[in-house]
Amino acid sequence: MTFTIVARDAETGDLGICLATSPLGVASRCPHVKGGVAAISSQCHSDWRHGLAGLKLAGQGWPPEQILGALRQKDRFFDYRQIGIVTADGRAAAHSPSHGAVWTGHLVGEGFVAMGNNLSGAGVVGAIHDSFAAGGGGGFGERLVQAIEAGYAAGGETIGQRSAGLVICTAGVERPLIDIRVDMANPLPEEGGDAVRDLRRLFDAYGPLAPYYAGDWLDNPELTLSGYAAARAIA
């Protein structure tokens, strides 16, 4: 039901997840990201407990494969879950469930995981993988969104995507650099809309403002949004 990119930015060390699915509110339960630690998505029959437990183990230095092993031991329904993990050092691993609806699977690249379940075909995950691996233009957030757009263009879910989200975290910062979501596409896919397209519009509007809200204005109460935008344009 969900297709996802879990990744580390090789240039900045930022960690992020972008994903889309047919159920509502996917970003409220599947992605778990902590800067300088790991990015983990638990999906298919998602279990937020795996995200929290995985982050704790990653913070203790566990590699992704070991984390997956530990999660498996504690969950008798593990083969209903799909999990992708990328740690702060760029190591990556994934588990795809034997009980996932056709098509379910993953590809692991250098510092990233492309994965999905109940998709129109293997080409969806292949397109996500190839898009992110190619690098493309723009920053980390742009590459994550482009990867999900590639999966969407390759077929995504046959019934469409009702929700989507993007989370990016930086080491040493307690809150995300960017955390945006489409909890319900407007209009819904059955009415001609799609959450992936909504996420693109949201990211294009908010993405350039993320540094302002994440840091620049915190200790600059006189710095207006228009002043910030003007300064960036001059720079």
Image: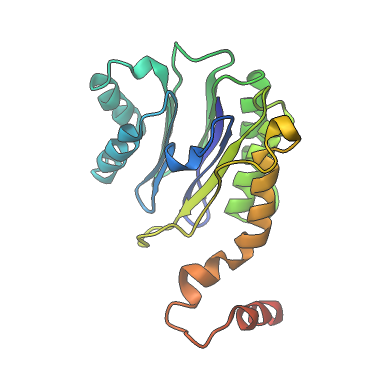
Which residue is most to the right?
Answer: 192
Q: Position of residue 187 (x, y in %)?
A: 70, 41
In the depicted view, which residue is nearer to us: 63 or 159? Answer: 159
Residue 124 drawn above or below residue 25: above
The residue sitting at 61% across, 21% down in the picture is: 119
Q: Could you tell me if residue 199 is visible in this image? A: yes
In the depicted view, which residue is nearer to us: 120 or 37? Answer: 120
The residue sitting at 27% across, 36% down in the picture is: 53
Q: Position of residue 102 (x, y in %)?
A: 58, 13
Residue 185 drawn above or below residue 122: below
Number of numbered tags placed on the structure image: 0
In the depicted view, which residue is nearer to us: 96 or 135? Answer: 96
Q: Position of residue 196 (x, y in %)?
A: 66, 40
| Quarter of the rendering containing residue 130 | top right
Q: Position of residue 165 (x, y in %)?
A: 55, 44
Q: Is residue 70 left or right of residue 160?
A: left
